[in-house]
Amino acid sequence: MKYTKTLFLLLLPVVTCGQAMNYQIKTVLGTNVKAKYAYLAMPKNLSSTQDTGKFLIVPINDGIAEFKGTVDLGDDILKTAYIFVDDRANITMPETISKVKEGIWSAKARHIVVEDLTVEIKNKDSLASARITKDGKLTKEMEEYYQMLNNDQEIGFLKKYPDSPMSLFQLQYVVLMYELPLRSQLEAQGRDPRAYYQLLSERLRSTKQGVALKKRMDRLFVK
């Protein structure tokens, strides 16, 4: 089955006040890459260009830009964002959301998990191919998930990473799609969130997010 990440990204939940997490994200530009600014966009919801999420810009000095701060996870188990570089200093959140949604920046803006990571950029218009050189564990897992999803191996990801927050994060979207008018499509594909849930570790199932997800599934599959 072939999916675009946009479908999942449009379902990103609104973040509320909750747990805070520190992050340090560094971009290192290759010798031939010319850009003046690095951007980090953390939209609350890609369905609205009026998003009030976190939007950061820092100058690139000697080929290096760094974002360091704290993000509110709210009720989420992790937070995702977009990182990109450009010569312009006037790019806005609405422009970023619009171009990501339309697929115009599918290569330019790198979808990442907000965590400690360092990414090496050799082409400012193709951050999708930029190499993560340090940390970035969950970002790597997210990219592996999309690869396995496109190869009909979604369940294989959950079996491989039963204790990863990324497994619970993606299962939340499967359940959300069941709650939307996509249930029959997912059922035809054999994507049963109840079976997926049983693959999660006891630790993940016992988290606040895991317990809340179980309650949502119970409502979906009332006998």
Image (cartoon, rainbow, N blue to C red):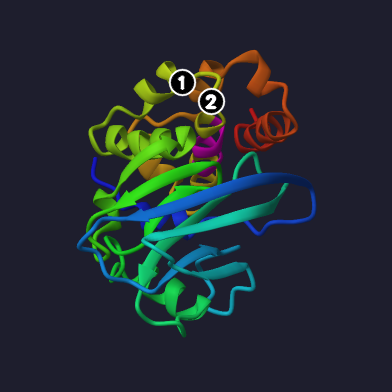
At 56% from the left and 57% from the top, the residue drawn is: 67
The magenta stretch spans which residues?
168-173
Could you tell me residue 41's position as x and y percent? 52, 65
Camera-side residue of 130 and 159: 130
Circle 2 Cα neighbour tier, 10 Å, few/some/many (<14 / 14–19 / ≥20): some
Q: Residue furthest right?
A: 17
At 24% from the left and 64% from the top, the residue drawn is: 33
**Residue 132 visible in rendering:** yes
Q: Can you tell which quarter of the image residue 35 is in? A: bottom left
Which residue in the protein does label 1 denote? 161
Contact between labelled residues 1 and 2, with CB atoms less than 8 Å apart: yes
Q: Can you tell which quarter of the image residue 51 is in? A: bottom right
Q: Residue furthest bottom?
A: 90
**Residue 75 visible in rendering:** no
* 140 to 3, vertically: above or below: above
Camera-side residue of 38 and 129: 38
Q: Secondary structure at mark 2?
A: loop
Could you tell me residue 200's position as x and y percent? 55, 19
Instruction: State left or right for residue 142 relative to residue 122.
Output: right
* 5 to 135, vertically: above or below: below
Instruction: State left or right for residue 52 relative to residue 198.
Output: right
| Quarter of the figure with the N terminus | top left
Instruction: State left or right for residue 16 relative to residue 204.
Output: right
Which residue in the protein does label 2 denote? 164
Could you tell me residue 28's position as x and y percent? 37, 53
* 198 to 147, vertically: above or below: above
Amino acid bearing label 1: Tyr
Q: Residue furthest top?
A: 202
Could you tell me residue 115's position as x and y percent? 55, 43
Amino acid bearing label 2: Ser
At 29% from the left and 27% from the top, the residue drawn is: 153
